[in-house]
Image: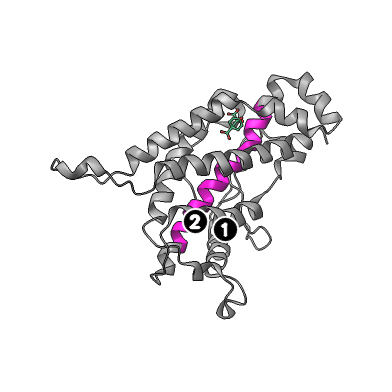
Amino acid sequence: LSCASSAKSASMTLASVRNSLIKQEDTIIFCLIQRARFPINSHSYTSSSFLNGSSILTYYVKHIEVIQSEVGGYANPEEVPFFNYHLSSPVVPPNEPEKFLYPAAASVNISEIILKTYIEKLVPLFTSSGDDGQYALSVASDMACLQALSRRIHYGRFVAETKFRGAKADYISAINSQDKATLTKLITNKSVENTVKARVYKKAKIFGQNVSLHDNKSNTTTKYKVDPLVVSHIYGEWIIPLTKLVELEYLLRRLN
Ligand SMILES: O=C(O)C(=O)C[C@]1(C(=O)O)C=C[C@@H](O)C=C1
C-alpha cells in the first residue's frame, strides 16, 4: 500500500489535505518511473484462459488485496480497494481510524474507472511499445501505480469534506438541488490546478534524471525516465478531473 502519510483526520483542513496531495505527487511520479522501465506488455492486460478469464494484472491485484486486507489494509478510509467483494477480515487487531468523512458519502468508489483509464489511456502514454515477457515485474509496478493513483483520486472525498465544512451554506443549497454545475464551480480552483501541473512537471524533471558521479558533457540532451510533459498531461487530463469527479460524487451524497 502507498506509504504517503496524511494529516490526522480530526484536524484535517483544506491546507493539510492539499499538503498530502503534494506529497502523494512524489509517490505517483516514482511509481510511473518504475513502470516505465518495462514496455507496455499489453498481454498482461488481456483476459487469460489460464486465470479463469482474469488478466494477469487483475488476477494479481485481487490476490494481493486479499493479503493486504488480512494485515489490516483498507481499514483506513484513505485506502480504497479495486476489488471489494472478496476481501478478508483482518487477522491482526484493528487500528481504529478517526472518523472524518460523512458516512453516507464515504463509500464513493470509482476504482473501475481508474483501472480502465490507467490501462487504456495512461500506460500507452508513458511506456514504450513491445513486450519483454516480464509480466510479474511489470504488473507489480502497475499495482503500485494503481494504488498511488487511487489513493490520490479518492482523496477527493477528504478535499470535498473540508470544502463543505468551510462554506456550508453555499454547498447545502447546491446539494439540496443536486446542482452538479454549481457544485463543480464551487470545487474548482483553476490556479491551484495550474500550480499542480507545473509542480509535477518540475518534479518529473528532477526525479527522472540519470544520476552520474562524473559531469557528463553530453548531458545537454538529457533524457528523462518519464517525459515531464506526459506527467503534467496525465495530471491535467485524468488525475485532477477524476479527483473532481470523486469530490462531486461525495458532495451529492453529503446530506443523505
Ligand atoms: O486543491 C483543491 O482545491 C482540489 O480540489 C484538488 C484539485 C486537484 O485535483 O489537484 C481539484 C480541483 C481544484 O480545481 C484544484 C485542485
Q: Which amino acid lies under the numbered mark 1 shown in the image of this protein? A: Glu
- Which region of the structure is painted magenta? 139-162
Q: Tell me if I can see residue 30 in this picture.
A: yes
Q: Residue 14, position in %: x, y?
A: 59, 25
Task: Say left or right for 18 vs 231.
Answer: right
Q: Amino acid under label 2? A: Val
Is 248 above or below relative to 167?
below
Disc 2 residue: CB within 8 Å of ligand 1: no
**Lateral position of residue 118 relative to residue 128, left or right:** right
Q: Is residue 6 magenta?
A: no
- Residue bearing the label numbered 2: 123
Query: Where is mark 1, residue-wise?
Result: 120
Q: Which residue is pictured at 55% across the width and 62% down the height?
A: 61
- Does dot 1 land on a helix, a strand or a loop? helix
Local packing at callout 2 (Cα closer than 10 Å; few below 14, some 14-19, many 20+) is some
Front residue of this view, candidates 145 and 67: 145
Q: Are marks 2 and 1 in contact (CB under 8 Å)?
A: yes
- Residue drawn at x 55%, y 54% as measured from the top left: 121
Comparing 127 with 70, the one in front is 127
Q: Where residue 119 sits: x, y (%)?
A: 55, 58
* Quadrant location, the C terminus: top right
**Residue sitting at x 58%, y 63%:** 62
User: Dividing the image into four equal quarters, which quarter contains ligand 1?
Assistant: top right
Distance Cα–Cα, label 2 vs label 1: 7 Å
User: Foreground residue, 88 or 144?
Assistant: 144
Secondary structure of residue under mark 2? helix
Residue 158 on the magenta segment? yes
